[in-house]
Amino acid sequence: MTASAAPTPPFWETGLILRVRSGSRAYGLAVATSDEDSRGVCVPPRQFLLGLDSFEQHESDGGDHVVYGLAKFARLALQGNPNIIETLFTPTEHVLHCDALGALLVAARGAFLSRRVGERFAGYATGQLTRMRNHRRALQTPGLSDERLARRNPARAELEARYGFDTKHAMHLIRLLRMGHEVLATGAVHVHRSDAQELLSIRHGGWSFERVAEEAARLLEQLTGAIAGSALPEAPDERAANELVIELHERALYGKRLG
């Protein structure tokens, strides 16, 4: 019997230029139950760049592993999307794949930094706090808590049942606000957290909800106040980013930069 041929890898794998470990393991905040997450960038085949087809991203079942087309990745980076900015600044020990084109992308990461990053980090953190408050309110409402817990991720539901609020959300809320201020104040994106032990203590119930909410309000005020005074430009260098995407597409298609 002839052995069946191995399946052909999908183009988002064969065209991969950068992949990094993401989530709690990249932050230094992993616990025994933490998933293995990754985020990547690919250059799609020519029909997606020159023809009518389009490709933006592929997600694995469950969304733990995401690969973005280069153009969408760059658009999100220009918007200051925290997940995308983190991908560009992930420490070397958490880079899972980086070819020559990926190295060019990472080398140009400064073009994507602007005060927008602070604005987006603040926005994401505010959304995190709102969700956390809503879940806590539901837990405290007679007749709703069992229904809400039944619909939740089991690990998150267990945290809510034990501590009265989602302490993992609380941990990432404080992390986001601190990271956003660091970017505005120093221009550096510290993905791997030097404050990991304190953040993990939040996850493990070391802070009350009231303390989390109070600290989040203080950090949010600090972050928003730092936007106007930041040395970062008001907007990212969209022209440089566009030229970079064109160059990387051309190199992937033709092996060299065209004239």
Image (cartoon, rainbow, N blue to C red):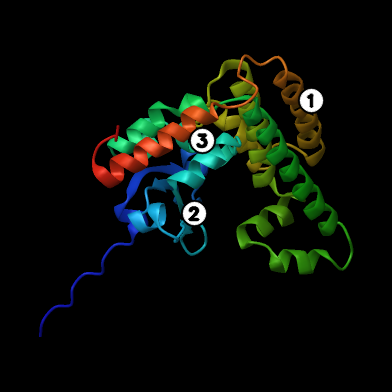
Residue 56 image position (x, y, % from top left): 49, 54
The disc at residue 56 is 2
Considering every residue shown, the one lying at the far left of the view is: 1
Instruction: Choose the circle earlier in sequence order: 1 or 3.
Output: 3
Kind of residue indicated by mark 3: Glu
Q: Which residue is mark 1?
A: 221
Q: Earlier in the sequence, mark 3 or mark 2?
A: 2
Residue 93, labelled with which disc? Answer: none
At x 29% / y 47%, what residue is drawn? 253
Q: Is residue 147 above or below residue 56?
A: below
Which amino acid type corresponds to the residue marked 2 in the rendered image?
Glu
At horizontal 88% and vertical 60% (from top left) the residue drawn is 141
Residue 171 seen in the current view? yes
Task: First in sequence, mark 2 or 1: give its number.
Answer: 2
For label 3, the residue is 86
How packed is label 2: few (under 14 Cα within 10 Å), some, or many (20 or more)? Answer: some
Q: For this view, does 187 lie left or right of residue 99?
A: right
Front of the two marks 3 and 2: 2
User: For the residue carrying disc 1, how many other residues have a C-alpha within 10 Å: few (<14), some (14-19), or many (20+)?
Assistant: few
